[in-house]
Image: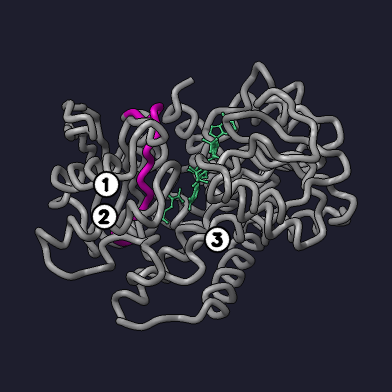
């Protein structure tokens, strides 16, 4: 199943509960604008290389559109469209004054040098600079991009439009970035995992966790949760699954990946090395946190999942048929549009600081993030109880209802 079709199925389930008529459903679901561009650069060896870049602007009823940039070989229009749509409901779930967008380039950044990635980023900005801006569409990091990519993006955009760091978030802290943005998605995931586990009557020390993906989101979630006394028994990256039933030494693990030339976990000890996807089926795992790609839990592998709770740190990790099976088995799923909303929340704080030429302390960022995440969680928990629906349907209901209301109030339709 393609990514956008999966998002549409989740959307429809909630729209049905909200009794939104078919024409309005179509209007809410259809992206405002989709941009596909050719991005050609000179590689370090002097050869020309061509890539395809995308920016999908899904909805702006609640404010400027917001969403990350992904550099990954699997990036295509369908994936970006689905991710942009998720951003619309996500920003509404945490009640930010934003709409949703997403972008990316089909490229494997691990095969490019830093200078080649910089040239690629700048060439992409040359193609899309006139459709993004602090009041229209504000990019940010996602898979395969980081604070350096944000910095090059800003610098190139400012060559056309002049100084305005609020054009992009997730920048280096010393260049108008927000303290706490780098950790924000993982911290939000951690905060809500603690809350949900407690709500379900489970004890952190007796709740084993497995995390798929050990990049920005996976590492910060692991750090937060191990500090909250959860045993992190398994983590994975593209090189494999690293498992220790006694709990991995997360601090050592972070030190190890920082020293590895490509940031990989391979070579870490003490632990058992298993095939990459074995992480999904471990017997002694209570909480599974997918924090890598979408579409990893499918109809084919869902019966092998043993966890009681799944926290969707990644965007779209569970396909709709698998979601139904998990619901029937009583597995609690905290949906992406709530679970990973910490990143865009602190991006909003960065944008606000940039616009005010003011800097918040890390304590203030963390306090406001915790407050936003807790409030959204309670709203969705209550909605799920009231309507007897899953947390995913409840989150979609909240997000869609807010965007629907803004659309009606603006008289856009
Ligand atoms: N960054 C952010 O602020 C936000 C990110 N997200 C979502 O979180 C997810 C992760 O993003 P982020 O952490 O930024 O990305 P990163 O690029 O920083 O890290 C991705 C990680 O996933 C690993 N990975 C890739 N494919 C697989 C696989 N098949 N099995 C196991 N591990 C795999 C990578 O391994 P390796 O390093 O070996 O390549 C890497 O460890 C994405 O779905 C993203 O959309 C959501 C909200 C905000
Ligand atoms: O920080 C942001 O603006 C967006 C992050 C993102 O792309 C996401 O939440 O999926």
Foreground: 338 or 352?
Answer: 352
Residue hosting label 1: 118
Q: Residue furthest top?
A: 300
- Above or below, comparing residue 126 to residue 61 in the picture: above
Residue hosting label 2: 152
Q: Disc 3 or disc 1, which is closer to the eye?
A: 1
Q: Residue furthest left?
A: 160
Residue hosting label 3: 183
State the separation of the CA atoms marked 2 and 3: 21 Å
Give residue 21's position: percent from left, percent from top.
Answer: 40, 39
Dot 3 or dot 1: first in sequence order is 1
Give residue 205's position: percent from left, percent from top.
Answer: 88, 55
Tell me, yes or no, whether the two marked residues, 2 and 1, touch with CB atoms within 8 Å: yes
Give residue 89's position: percent from left, percent from top.
Answer: 45, 50
State the separation of the CA atoms marked 3 and 1: 23 Å
Foreground: 79 or 39?
Answer: 39
User: Residue 66 magenta-drawn?
Assistant: yes
Helix, strand or loop at label 1? It is helix
In the image, 225: left or right of 2?
A: right
Q: Which residues are magenta?
A: 63-76
Helix, strand or loop at label 3? It is helix
Q: Which mark is residue 212?
A: none
Residue displayed at 24% across by 40% down: 120
Dot 2 or dot 1: first in sequence order is 1
Give residue 202's position: percent from left, percent from top.
Answer: 87, 53
- Above or below, comparing residue 317 to residue 124 in the picture: above
State the separation of the CA atoms marked 2 and 1: 7 Å
Tell me, yes or no, whether the two marked residues, 2 and 3, touch with CB atoms within 8 Å: no
Q: Disc 2 or disc 3, which is closer to the eye?
A: 2
Q: Is residue 143 visible?
A: yes
Residue displayed at 65% across by 29% down: 240
């Amino acid at each position: 199943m393609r990514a956008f079709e999966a998002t549409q199925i989740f959307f429809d389930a909630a729209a049905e509960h909200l009794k939104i008529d078919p024409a309005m459903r179509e209007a809410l679901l259809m992206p405002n604008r989709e941009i596909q561009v050719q991005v050609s650069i000179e590689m370090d060896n002097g050869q020309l290389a061509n890539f395809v870049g995308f920016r999908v602007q899904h909805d702006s009823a609640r404010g400027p559109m917001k969403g990350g940039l992904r550099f990954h070989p699997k990036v295509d229009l369908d994936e970006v469209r689905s991710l942009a749509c998720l951003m619309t409901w996500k920003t509404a779930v945490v009640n930010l004054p934003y709409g949703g967008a997403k972008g990316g380039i089909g490229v494997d950044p691990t095969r490019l040098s830093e200078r080649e990635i910089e040239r690629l980023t700048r060439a992409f900005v040359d193609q899309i600079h006139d459709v993004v801006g602090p009041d229209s569409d504000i990019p940010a990091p996602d898979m395969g991009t980081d604070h350096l990519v944000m910095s090059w993006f800003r610098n190139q955009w400012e060559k056309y439009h002049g100084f305005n760091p609020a054009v992009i978030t997730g920048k280096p802290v010393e260049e108008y970035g927000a303290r706490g943005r780098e950790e924000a998605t993982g911290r939000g995931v951690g905060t809500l995992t603690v809350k949900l586990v407690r709500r379900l009557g489970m004890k952190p020390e007796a709740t084993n966790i497995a995390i798929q993906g050990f990049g920005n989101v996976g590492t910060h979630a692991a750090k937060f949760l191990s500090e909250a006394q959860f045993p992190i028994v398994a983590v994975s990256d593209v090189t494999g699954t690293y498992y220790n039933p006694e709990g991995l030494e997360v601090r050592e693990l972070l030190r190890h990946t920082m020293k590895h030339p490509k940031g990989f976990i391979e070579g870490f000890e003490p632990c058992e090395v298993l095939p990459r996807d074995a992480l999904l089926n471990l017997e002694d795992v209570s909480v599974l946190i997918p924090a890598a790609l979408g579409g990893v839990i499918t109809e084919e592998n869902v019966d092998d999942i043993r966890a009681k709770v799944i926290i969707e740190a990644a965007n779209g990790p569970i396909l709709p048929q698998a979601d139904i099976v998990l619901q029937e088995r009583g597995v609690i799923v905290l949906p992406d549009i709530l679970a990973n909303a910490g990143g865009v929340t602190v991006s909003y704080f960065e944008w606000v600081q940039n616009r005010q030429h003011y800097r918040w302390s890390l304590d203030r960022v963390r306090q406001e993030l915790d407050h936003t995440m807790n409030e959204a969680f309670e709203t969705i928990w209550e909605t799920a109880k009231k309507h007897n629906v899953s947390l995913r349907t409840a989150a979609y209901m909240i997000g869609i209802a807010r965007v629907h209301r803004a659309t009606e109030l603006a008289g856009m339709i």
